[in-house]
Each structure stands twice: as C-alpha cells, then as structure tokens.
Image (cartoon, rainbow, N blue to C red):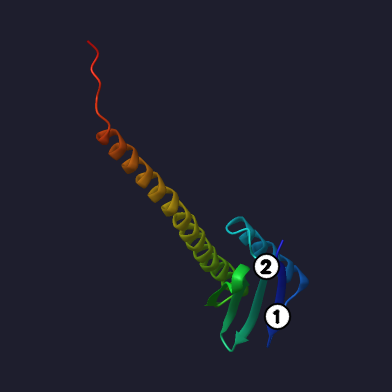
Amino acid sequence: MAQINITVRHIEISEKLKNLAITKIDKLNRFFGHINRIDVIFDFDSKFYKAEMIIMGPHRLALVAYASASDFLSAIETVVDKMERQLTKLKGKLRSHHTKGVQSAIAKLSEELIKDQDDKPYIEAL
C-alpha cells in the first residue's frame, strides 16, 4: 500500500471529503502495484479548485497530473482519471518491453532450428 500525503492550500476541507479523496486515490494501486508514495495537493484559486497528484515509484519514477474544476469532487475525479491513464500506459510499455525480448529470442531460436534442418542431409529408406 502506498503512502498518501494530502496537502490543502487556501481552503479547508472536511474529513468526509478528505476520506472520499483517499478512497478514490487508493484505487490507483490496481493499475500499477509498485507505487511507493502519492502526494496530492488541493488548492483554491478564486473560481476553481485545483488538484495536483504526484506519484513516486521505483527507480525514481515520477508521474504528475493536474486538474482544475468548478467543484472539489470534479477536480479529484479528473486528476484520478488522468493518473489512471498514465499508469495504464506505463504498465503497457513495461509489459511490451519485456515481451519484445521473449519474442525476439523465440524468433532467433526458430531461425536457428530451420537453418540446422536445412544443413542436414535427408536419408531415404530403401
């Protein structure tokens, strides 16, 4: 489970809203299991609620998403959706990176087997 740090600037939010934000943010572990820390910053700028999310992963991996909306819940949902897309894309890249090695190894092995079969003479039975 990732450590979640919530910072609130220029506004005060209730515990109910904070817990709702934590439950939405905590679901991000489904998309990428190697999350070390999640920092969330909520801010209010005269008309809009702003949400910023920074996810720290292994090997100094850092993903950042921003969102602003007219209400607090929309800002949370938008930033979580953006981060879900980033995590899904990252996981897909990691999986395809590893499978390319396996696929190329299988292709090389099959080429070698075909080459070996061509070099051997066929023996016909009488």
Residue 85, percent from left and from top: 49, 63
Q: Earlier in the sequence, mark 2 or mark 1?
A: 1
Q: Residue furthest top?
A: 126
Q: Which one is in front, 101 or 58?
A: 101
The image quarter in which residue 50 lies: bottom right
Q: Amino acid at mark 1?
A: Thr
* Residues packed near mark 1 inside 10 Å, few (<14), some (14 to 19) or many (20 plus): few
Q: Amino acid at mark 2?
A: Asn
Position of residue 42 relative to residue 126, above or below, is below
* Eye-nearest disc, 2 or 1: 2
Query: What label does residue 7 carry, if any?
Result: 1
Position of residue 31 relative to residue 120, above or below, is below
Residue at 61%, 55% in the rendered image: 30
Q: Is residue 121 left or right of residue 47?
A: left
Q: Residue furthest right?
A: 15
| Residue beneath disc 2 | 36
Q: Which one is in front, 9 or 46?
A: 9
Query: What label does residue 79 carry, if any?
Result: none
* Residues packed near mark 2 inside 10 Å, few (<14), some (14 to 19) or many (20 plus): some
Q: Are marks 2 and 1 in contact (CB under 8 Å)?
A: no
Q: Which one is in front, 107 or 49?
A: 107
Residue at 65%, 76% in the rendered image: 40
